[in-house]
Image: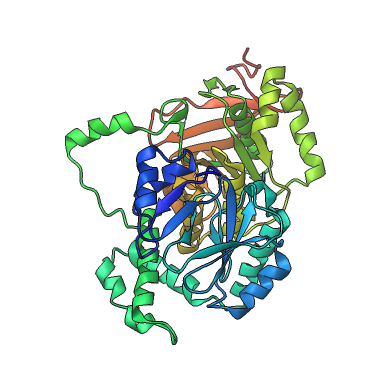
């Protein structure tokens, strides 16, 4: 406690005995909790990511892991030993956020984690002539160290050399997701036990994995059957509505479609910039400013400013300040969302957007647009981008998917005119369709959770590069 560290009493399986231990990432121990820790006769752990981070090296599973860590990570004089003979390297915290993750027999314990350090066979020692004063005396991990760890994991995956722990972690998570009981999963421990390990040790490891999978929400939700009264009670739990009533809300899936060169990307940019500053979108008012991410794959970086400048300059000075704070975009480049999902997920965890636009679908999907099975596999990955638990976000983000209509599609076709598989229409909560008009563009809507807005007749202003409404005579509506 002298260094402000939050301590945790743990059971023999290394799990904290306090179910609400994660609260200690935001606060210190109260006197009663401190007394429990002091009197606890077993293993004691410390919350990581506050004063220090830890790299956990499972050299008892991989003799090369320690050598790799010494070569690629900074030397630290504060070193611990685990019960199984592994090493714990302690590092100071820094502006670089260290996650709690796994990198092929080397784990990081940072934000959201804890490390066992005392009791049982755990020990920790200071290897320096100078006295220890604070965790700030330790070196810190930076981006190049985290990138080296990521490269280590990817190299192992490419070689197919995933270790026992990684393999069983995925197996256990799959079993939990399939609804299997703890007893059923643990019944496999004897066949899973490797040479040199006891069944009891395997049970201990698998139990930790089961609890971790359940804590992270891998359990199936099941089919919920509700009464008529539930329908009215659930109205109190509607997601936060960002634009209109049932138009755009937290976690909504939005589909924007139109023929090439009609201005879909410009329309989406108008949505995102107006959302980023909490402004107006064609008569609809955003509830507040939102952080947005434009995953674009068509415009080269040096030309994005050309597309944005007139639009940004049309906003008031205080709105432009909000845009600088809340609007993010990616460089041009094809990205297969199915194969490179982790890369996109890590980006979203870093930016923490409330609204994400994928523009256009074709540049993020490597499959056959007409194949419902392949499109559904892609949409499952898109849906995962609205999983606030997976992304460690307070609320599920809005997803705006930008796509083309099929050749020859007209306003009469409605959203069935979207190019490719019909499953896209079933996927969306809110749809916006742009079609060519005699003057400008017609904008039609389809909402599943609210009243449909009336169609709008719009065109791009040459001054602001924003869409503006036209009246019945084709003049700009003031």
The image shows residue 347, relative to residue 81, as above or below, that is: above
Q: Quadrant of the image for the C terminus?
A: top right
Q: Quadrant of residue 438?
A: top right
Q: Residue at x 43, y 46 (%)?
A: 22
Q: Residue at x 60, y 52 (%)?
A: 98
Q: Whole-percent x and y of residue 428?
A: 45, 44
Left or right relative to 106: residue 43: left
Q: Nearer the viewer, residue 139 or 289?
A: 139
Q: Residue at x 57, y 39 (%)?
A: 353
Q: Whole-percent x and y of residue 386?
A: 48, 46
Left or right relative to 299: residue 273: left
Left or right relative to 98: residue 248: left
Q: Nearer the viewer, residue 397 or 457?
A: 397
Q: Is residue 262 visible?
A: no
The image shows residue 229, relative to residue 151, as above or below, that is: above
Looking at the image, the residue that sits furthest to the right is 302
Q: Quadrant of residue 306?
A: top right
Q: Residue at x 50, y 27 (%)?
A: 455
Q: Whole-percent x and y of residue 457?
A: 58, 25
């Amino acid at each position: 406690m002298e260094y402000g560290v939050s301590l945790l009493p743990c059971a023999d399986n290394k799990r904290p005995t306090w179910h609400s231990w994660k609260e200690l990432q935001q606060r210190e121990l109260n006197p009663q909790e401190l007394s429990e820790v002091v009197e606890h006769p077993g293993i004691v752990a410390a919350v990581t990511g506050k004063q220090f981070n830890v790299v956990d090296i499972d050299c008892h599973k991989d003799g090369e892991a320690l050598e790799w860590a010494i070569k690629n990570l900074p030397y630290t004089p504060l070193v611990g030993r685990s019960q199984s003979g592994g090493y714990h390297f302690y590092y100071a915290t820094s502006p670089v956020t260290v996650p709690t993750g796994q990198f092929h027999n080397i784990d990081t314990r940072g934000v959201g984690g804890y490390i066992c350090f005392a009791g049982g066979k755990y020990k920790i020692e200071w290897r320096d002539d100078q006295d220890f004063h604070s965790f700030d005396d330790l070196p810190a991990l930076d981006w190049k160290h985290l990138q080296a760890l990521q490269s280590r994991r990817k190299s192992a995956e490419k070689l197919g050399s995933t270790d026992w722990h990684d393999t069983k972690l995925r197996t256990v998570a799959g079993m939990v997701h399939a609804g299997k009981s703890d007893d059923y999963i643990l019944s496999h421990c004897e066949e899973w036990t490797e040479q040199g390990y006891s069944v009891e040790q395997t049970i201990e490891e698998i139990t930790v994995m089961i609890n971790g999978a359940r804590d992270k929400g891998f359990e199936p939700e099941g089919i919920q059957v509700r009464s008529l009264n539930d329908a009215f009670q659930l109205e109190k739990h509607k997601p936060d509505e960002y634009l209109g009533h049932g138009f755009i809300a937290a976690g909504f899936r939005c589909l924007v479609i139109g023929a090439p060169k009609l201005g879909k990307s410009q329309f989406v940019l108008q949505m995102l910039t107006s959302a980023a500053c909490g402004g107006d979108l064609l008569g609809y008012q955003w509830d507040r400013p939102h952080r947005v991410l434009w995953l674009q794959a068509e415009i080269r970086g040096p030309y994005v400013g050309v597309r944005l400048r007139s639009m940004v300059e049309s906003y008031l000075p205080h709105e432009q300040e909000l845009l600088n704070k809340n609007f993010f975009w990616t460089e041009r480049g094809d990205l297969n969302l199915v194969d490179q999902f982790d890369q996109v997920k890590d980006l979203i965890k870093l930016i923490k957007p409330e609204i994400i636009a994928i523009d256009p679908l074709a540049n993020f999907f490597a499959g056959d647009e007409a194949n419902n099975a392949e499109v559904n596999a892609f949409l499952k990955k898109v849906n995962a981008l609205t999983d606030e638990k997976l992304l460690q976000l307070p609320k599920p983000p809005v997803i705006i998917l930008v796509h083309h209509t099929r050749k020859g599609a007209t306003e009469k076709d409605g959203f069935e005119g979207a190019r490719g598989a019909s499953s896209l229409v079933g996927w969306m909560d809110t749809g916006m369709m742009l079609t060519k008009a005699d003057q400008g563009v017609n904008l039609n809507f389809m909402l599943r959770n609210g009243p449909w807005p009336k169609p709008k007749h719009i065109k791009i202003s040459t001054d602001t590069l924003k869409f503006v409404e036209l009246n019945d005579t084709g003049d700009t509506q003031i």
